[in-house]
Image: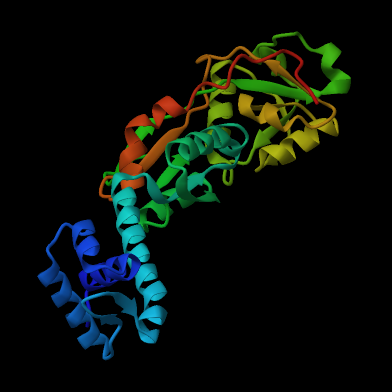
């Protein structure tokens, strides 16, 4: 079978139609160039060039072979370039798992940074609860997880991501009955939408712990799994809810958000997690920068609404 070097020699001669110029272009002498052409013709099984002391011209077979030979060389060069880009983490693929609330503001910021850093990157984004992300990391189905603590897994590297405050979501029709910056005490005996202790375990434990430490006992009217469903119930006037500040990006009509005083001030935590043995060059190239790419969500504006 012919080699790429045979094709390079043939293409140079076919384009120059002169062995001397082709040899100079390839930085070689004419005898080895002629030998490469002979070897190629032997492997192809037919003459590709007619040569005399006066001229070199392509045979009919040579004219048909030239564009295919040039295409093979181009593909080989592109494959080498692509391999180098993959090895450097400048191209490739990255599978990212994320919880639903991360998708409101944080995920677009991360995707924007990834696209800027790696324009040739193919991203796979999968919305998954934390437990499903841990299973997917174990099974190597995702490269990076944006999940909620705690994470205790000896095969994972974890880094702190964004920490954000909770805000109070309340019906617009009841906004005037609430302080501009209520405390948790204001929730005592108020109709309250709580997170499910099973499907929304992280937020349930977080909010339940904050209320218990504050000595507050709201009137829990529903347990809800998804934040967007919780906000729909707030809009309907069933009660108020504590949601991560980034959820204000949803801005459903008829819902008002108020900053609320809690200790700690930013209790909603996020972790970045990936396998220690993940050899994806893209992940290796960005892992040191991930925390820098996740800025805070900015100052909260009181009475923000659609």
Give x and y (percent) for residue 23. Answer: 19, 63
Residue in front for this viewpoint, 87 or 284: 87
Residue in front for this viewpoint, 151 or 253: 253
Q: Is residue 262 left or right of residue 236?
A: left
Residue drawn at x 76%, y 8% as measured from the top left? 179
Residue drawn at x 69%, y 29% as measured from the top left? 249
One can see residue 222 in this view = no
Task: Locate the N terminus by quadrant.
Answer: bottom left
Q: Judge whether 39 appears above or below 96 on screen.
A: below
**Identity of the residue furthest to the front in this view:** 54
Residue drawn at x 39%, y 75% as measured from the top left? 68
**Identity of the residue furthest to the right in this view:** 173
Q: In this view, does 233 lie to the left or right of 298?
A: right
One can see residue 10 in this view = yes
Q: Judge whether 154 appears above or below 3 on screen.
A: above
Dividing the picture into quadrants, the one containing residue 88 is top left
Total numbered labels = 0
Give x and y (percent) for residue 49. Answer: 29, 80
């Amino acid at each position: 079978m012919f080699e790429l070097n045979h094709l390079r020699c043939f293409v140079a001669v076919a384009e120059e139609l002169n062995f001397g110029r082709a040899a100079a272009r390839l930085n070689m002498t004419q005898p080895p160039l002629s030998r490469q052409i002979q070897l190629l013709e032997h492997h192809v099984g037919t003459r590709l060039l007619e040569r005399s002391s006066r001229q070199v011209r392509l045979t009919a077979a040579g004219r048909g072979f030239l564009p295919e030979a040039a295409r093979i060389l181009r593909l080989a060069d592109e494959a080498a370039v692509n391999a180098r880009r993959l090895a450097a983490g400048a191209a490739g693929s990255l599978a990212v798992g994320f919880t639903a609330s991360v998708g409101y503001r944080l995920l677009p910021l991360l995707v924007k940074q990834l696209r800027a850093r790696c324009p040739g990157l193919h991203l796979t984004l999968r919305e998954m609860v934390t437990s499903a992300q841990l299973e997917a990391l174990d099974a190597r189905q995702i490269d990076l997880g944006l999940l909620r603590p705690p994470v205790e897994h000896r095969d994972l590297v974890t880094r702190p991501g964004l920490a954000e405050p909770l805000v109070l979501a309340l019906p617009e029709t009841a906004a005037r009955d609430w302080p501009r910056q209520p405390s948790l005490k204001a929730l005592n005996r108020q109709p309250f939408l709580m997170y499910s202790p099973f499907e929304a375990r992280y937020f349930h434990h977080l909010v339940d712990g904050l209320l218990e430490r504050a000595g507050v006992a709201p009137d829990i009217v529903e347990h809800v799994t998804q934040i967007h469903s919780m906000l729909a119930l707030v809009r309907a006037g069933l009660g108020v809810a504590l949601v991560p500040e980034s959820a204000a990006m949803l801005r459903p009509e008829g819902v008002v958000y108020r900053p609320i005083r809690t200790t700690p001030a930013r209790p909603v935590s996020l972790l970045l997690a990936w396998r220690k043995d993940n050899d994806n060059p893209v992940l290796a190239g960005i892992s040191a920068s991930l925390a820098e790419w996740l800025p805070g969500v900015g100052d909260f504006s009181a009475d923000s609404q659609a």
